[in-house]
């Protein structure tokens, strides 16, 4: 099970990179789009980062479910963690919607919205870490 935990942690770290970076990159992509009047290298980088991390997110969730079942027997704290991970996954999917819109040149959200949107994921990750470390239930 140690290897599975290592794989889980590595994939979570990779997925978190995108969860934290892509909303911020959208702000800079929006500025680049306005300056260039079209698609630029930052857009390509943002799309590639989002796509790459999607696979890591799937592996992280799959290994997390396996660990929750085999190691922790779906203890009550695991249910809380999984609920928070589900909310984070929904945040990630919403980020994907924003990326697809940006690819078409549609930047509807303000810089302030994207900054707040980015910080929501930070709060969710802190909550997940607290549940995993403290195991309150």
Image (cartoon, rainbow, N blue to C red):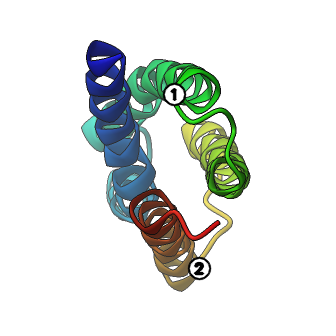
> Please, is residue 6 above or below residue 35 in the view?
above
Q: Residue furthest bottom?
A: 112
| SS category of the residue bearing label 1 | loop
Query: What residue appears at the point 38 percent right and 47 percent down from the top-left corner?
Result: 16
Lower sequence index among marks 2 and 1: 1
Percent coordinates x, y for residue 90 in the rendering: 72, 48
| SS category of the residue bearing label 2 | helix
Percent coordinates x, y for residue 80 in the rendering: 69, 58
Local crowd size for mark 1, using a 10 Å CA cut-off: few (<14), some (14–19), many (≥20): few
**Residue wearing tag 2:** 113
> Are the residues at dot 2 and dot 1 in contact (C-beta closer than 8 Å)?
no
117 relative to 39 in the view: left or right: right
Label 2 vs label 1, nearer the camera:
1
Can you see residue 7? yes
Query: What residue appears at the point 27 percent right and 29 percent down from the top-left corner?
Result: 10
Local crowd size for mark 2, using a 10 Å CA cut-off: few (<14), some (14–19), many (≥20): few
Percent coordinates x, y for residue 8 in the rendering: 38, 27
Query: What residue appears at the point 68 percent right and 65 percent down from the top-left corner?
Result: 108
Residue 12: numbered disc: none
Between 98 and 81, the residue placed more toward the observer is 81
Percent coordinates x, y for residue 48 in the rendering: 37, 25
Can you see residue 29? no
Between 13 and 51, the residue placed more toward the observer is 13
Quote the CA–CA distance across marks 2 and 1.
Answer: 39 Å
Between 22 and 11, the residue placed more toward the observer is 11
Between 133 and 118, the residue placed more toward the observer is 133
**Residue wearing tag 1:** 71
């Amino acid at each position: 099970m140690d290897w599975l935990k290592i794989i889980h942690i590595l994939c979570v770290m990779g997925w978190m990179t995108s969860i934290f970076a892509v909303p911020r990159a959208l702000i800079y992509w929006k500025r680049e789009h306005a300056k260039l009047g079209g698609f630029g290298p930052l857009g390509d980088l943002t799309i590639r980062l989002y796509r790459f991390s999607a696979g890591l997110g799937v592996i992280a969730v799959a290994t997390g479910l396996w660990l929750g079942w085999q190691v922790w027997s779906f203890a009550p704290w695991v249910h809380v963690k999984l609920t928070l991970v589900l909310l984070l996954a929904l945040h990630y999917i919403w980020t994907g919607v924003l990326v697809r819109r940006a690819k078409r040149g549609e930047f509807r959200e303000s810089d302030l919205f994207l900054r707040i949107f980015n910080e929501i994921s930070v709060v969710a990750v802190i909550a997940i870490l607290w549940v995993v470390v403290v195991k309150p239930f």
